[in-house]
Amino acid sequence: GAVVSQHPSWVICKSGTSVKIECRSLDFQATTMFWYRQFPKQSLMLMATSNEGSKATYEQGVEKDKFLINHASLTLSTLTVTSAHPEDSSFYICSARQDRTNQPQHFGDGTRLSIL
Amino acid sequence: DQQVKQNSPSLSVQEGRISILNCDYTNSMFDYFLWYKKYPAEGPTFLISISSIKDKNEDGRFTVFLNKSAKHLSLHIVPSQPGDSAVYFCAASAWEYGNKLVFGAGTILRVKS
C-alpha cells in the first residue's frame, strides 16, 4: 500500500517553456502533499506544502509565481514550473501523507527536469 | 543552518556484517525521526521511524536507536546485504512545524559481496 505515482519521470524542454508535473496517491487519500527539489549530491529541500482545497505554503526563498502548485483533490497535486530556465533543471520529488499525525510521507519516483 | 546532519558521506561494509548509519540533529523540538532509502533516479522509500518517547525501534534487519540527550540517532542493518546498497536519508519532524520533514544530506552505503 501507500503508493505515490509521479509523472513524467523525465522532461527535456526548451528555455521559456512551462512544465507540469503530476503527483498522485494511488491507494490512499492524501490530506497533505509536499514538493521537494534535489540538487546533485545534496539532500531533499522542501519547496512547498499543499493541503487539499487550500493554497500551498511555500518555503522561504521559493518563488510562488515560478512554481505553481495545485492540490485540487485528495489524490492529485500538480507542480507547474513556469517559464523554465536552465537553472530550474533539477530532480523534483513529491510526497504524500494521509493526515497530520505522525505518519510517514510516501514519495513518488521523482521527475528529472532538464531545461536546454 | 543544517538542523539534521549526516556527517559520513559514504560507508562501505562487507556482506553479512553490520552497517551503522549515524545522524545528528540540533533542534530539540523534533519529536519524530525517520530513515529513508533511495536508489538513483527513484524517490525515497520509507524504512523505519521512531518517536521521541522511545529509544529503540526494530523491524526485521533494521533497528533505529535514538539518544535524545545527545541528539543522535543511528540505523543498524544486520546482516547487511548487497541489495542494501543505496543512499540513506535521515529525516526529522516536529508537531509544532506541521510535521514537515527536514532531511540530512544522506549517506551512501555500499555493501560488498
Image (cartoon, coloured by chain):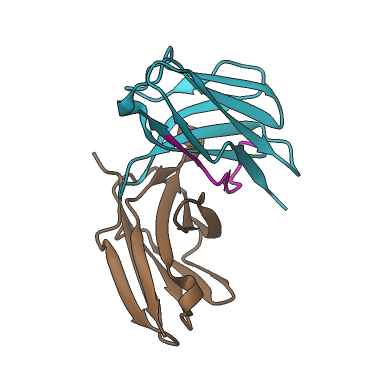
**Residue at position x 30%, y 50% in the image:** A41
The chain letter corresponding to cyan is A
**Residue at position x 29%, y 66% in the image:** B10
Stretch in magenta: A99-113
Given residues A39 and B48, the one toward you in this image is A39
For the question of whether residue A55 can be seen, the reply is yes
Q: Give percent across and percent down for residue B92.
A: 43, 48
Q: Residue furthest right?
A: A27
Give left or right: position of B58 versus A82: right
Q: Is-magenta flag for residue A107?
A: yes
Give left or right: position of A43 versus B2: right
In which quarter of the view is residue A65 placed? top left
Q: Main secondary structure of the magenta part?
A: loop
In which quarter of the view is residue A114 placed? top left
Quarter of the rendering occupied by the C terminus of chain A: top left
Q: Where is B76 relative to A99, above or below? A: below
Given residues A99 and B53, the one toward you in this image is A99
Give left or right: position of A115 versus A4: left
Q: Give percent across and percent down for residue B88.
A: 41, 60
Q: Give percent across and percent down for residue B68.
A: 37, 58
**Residue at position x 29%, y 60% in the image:** B70
Q: Is-magenta flag for residue A114?
A: no
The chain letter corresponding to brown is B
Q: Give percent across and percent down for residue A102.
A: 58, 46
